[in-house]
Image: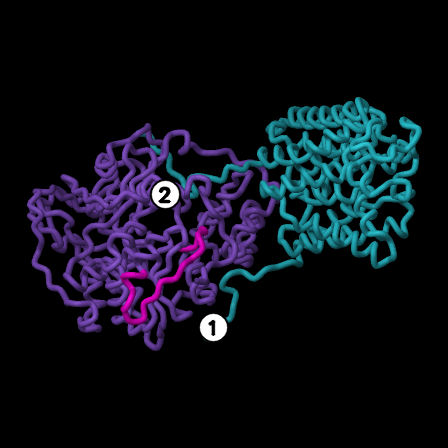
Amino acid sequence: MSIFTFRGGIHPLKDRHEGKSETRDKPVKEFVAKTVCIPVDTHLGAPSVPVVKKGDRVLIGQVIAEAAGPRGIPVHASVSGTVTAVGKMQMMGKLPSPCIFIENDEQDEWVELTPLGDVEQAAAEKIIPAIQAAGICGMGGACFPTHAKMTLPEGQTVDTIILNGAECETFLTADYRLMVEQSQRVVDGLRAAMRAMKVSRGVIAIEDNKPEAITAMQQAAAGRTGVEVATLKTKYPQGGEKQLIEAITGKQVPSGGLPMHVQVVVLNVATAAAIADAVKEGKPLVSRITTVTGCVKKPSNLLLRIGTSVSDAVGACGGYSEEPGKIFFGGSMTGLCIPDDQVPMTKANNGIVVLNEKQGKSHVENPCIRCGRCVEACPTKLNPMELRNLLDTDKMEEAEKKNLTDCILCGSCSYVCPAKRWLVASFKEAKDLIAARRN
Amino acid sequence: MNLRMSTGPHLLDKDTTQSLMLDVLIALIPATALGVYFFGVSAALVLLVCIVTAVLSELIWQVLMKKPVRITDFSAVVTGLILGLNLPANAPLWMAALGSAIAILLVKQLFGGIGHNFLNPAIFARAVLLASWPVHMTSYVLPQRLLLGSAAPSGVDVVASATPLLSTSQWSTMDLFIGNIPGTIGEVSKAAILVGFAYLLLRGTITWHVPTFFVGTVALLTWVLGGNPLTAVLTGGVLFGAVFMATDYVTNPMLRVGQCIFGVMCGVIVVVIRMYGGYPEGVTFAILFMNCITPLIDRYSKRKVYGEVKQHA
């Protein structure tokens, strides 16, 4: 069997199994919190508009904020109970996010659902609207509305859907557990997406450090039209959209282009599972699997309702094992830090990682010694050392000419740098400035 | 709860500037130990003076200039030790100290400290000493002790002004390999250098490209020009220079392709100097010259950025 990969990249936390050994064999357990705080603006696109007010009783799956604009998605109640406030909460962003707070009445009452039926039988043209109605957005981290990704511009076609099961980020085992335990859901979701987009080839791509997931997915895919499983080399950022496409198809997404320009759409495996629920059962996206690990007493893979606070999730794992110094959503390479543990779970949050005070400490930057490790590591083939020097000397335009905007912010350069330079951080800042200027 | 916020990556690789320098020092242990074994106390003294002067020069400069003191990154120790290993065991101690000070102050600190020197400090210092005191720099003593007792040349302790490069017939290949020959403290034992090289490769401190292309070119070109490729590699400072000096991060090219060009060019210059130049050995000048060319190589060696391709139809 051939193993697919890309050039460049790194192997982070290699000596500790990418930080995954604590949770990889822990089956998914459901945890339902007493209260939830559901943010309505976490997807890319216009924030949804709240349609409930304080004191309203809501059921699970009920729309509590309506989609705004063509890229918008509705937000649903993830527990049944009473709306206690429509307010704001400080999340990862600079400004507080609008949120809807609900107190769980523990009745677990669902709204009436209208399924489309079997993924092979359902009317193909109804699938994408059902995905939008279910409030599904990219669950691998970006939270891009899935229906918008699947709706192609006039004249554009794609021939392949790649399901991203690489899970190359450190610490995360949520996608792994999903593939091992619920492989049928994943394949059903892929088939629904393939039928909706009239695509004949569906590839489920998994890194070779997850043999159980590969076997499970192969078994689930057997006999399904056009579905295959591809084994990827374990390497970071193998699950980066562009690297994944290069590994599977041999094609590179042109600079400034999108995957569809090489006839590919990439979806996360968790997104596919959510699509299956939306089509087969008419269920909106109200919960997801999240890995809670690091300095917690019982690292776990939890099925959490959207809006569950970090402190509740950590409580479900036996609490903190040490005084936390840093907590982030996602893996240690690109995870987003949160200001305190009252921050709620989002649809895109595949992991909550707690570092202790020592691990969370800032580090001192030393002079570059030109070792070239960043150059070797860069999956985009940029020269991080040179880019950083250009940015330090205020030569933004020169840096743009050297393809700064092609940087995917994977952080490989910063990870390998022996001088501990803040490379990717400076690129993110510069890319944000460039984006702001262009808009 | 006081949480720190930053962009990723939140955990970094264990390697630091200090650990890389420490790796180089560890890799130099076999060559250093054998050098001291062969040449005795005088060799140990030369090495000690070089290291102490290098570290002190750096410390004094950084304190006087009110710059952060970085002697704990061990880069000055590496520079001092490499310079010392490049000197004959009977080199005057004042000369060793002067060389170290030149390396640290003139080449490293005046250009902005670690990472900013465009020449390899140790090798530039060696070149200065070679040009200024050629007799001191090329009067090699015979080893006081031999390893794996091979045909010992008679008259131990005699100053041999000729290097094995000029009179190779005197030494067996085994002697050249083990180091039972006159030469600088660190360069004589090829076996010890290779052990260090293997360690550096194993640890991932350096890659094989520069040393392999450097040594390979010397062997090939010597053979093409009618010489003996094996003695060409086993004599003089080719192996030591290729493994420990041409691989200096700061002064060799960034990209693999550039490193290969760098290695080949070093090899060519060494052979040209050896065969047609006024000096018996050319490693120092080859590496120095290529250090100067490095920015040029970097400028013209490009690789294709992801996505800079024509769209596939």
Badge 2 and badge 1 both on one subunit? no
Q: Which SS class for mark 2?
A: loop
Q: Identity of the amino acid at label 1?
A: His
Residue B247: horizontal and vertical position, in percent?
68, 44
Task: Give the mark toward the camera: 2 or 1.
Answer: 2
The Cα atoms of the two marked residues, 2 and 1, are separated by 37 Å
Q: Which residue is mark 1?
A: B312
Residue B43 figure quarter: top right
Task: Please tell me which residue is depicted at 77% across the width and 30% down the height of the picture.
Answer: B35
Q: Is residue A106 or residue B229 the one in the foreground?
A: B229
Magenta stretch bounds = A218-239
Task: Let me know if residue A75 is in the magenta part.
Answer: no
Colour assignment, chain A: purple
Q: Which chain is cyan?
A: B
Q: Which residue is mark 2?
A: A20
Q: Is residue B28 left or right of residue B278?
A: left
Q: Is residue A304 or residue B309 the one in the foreground?
A: A304
Residue A166: horizontal and vertical position, in percent?
38, 54
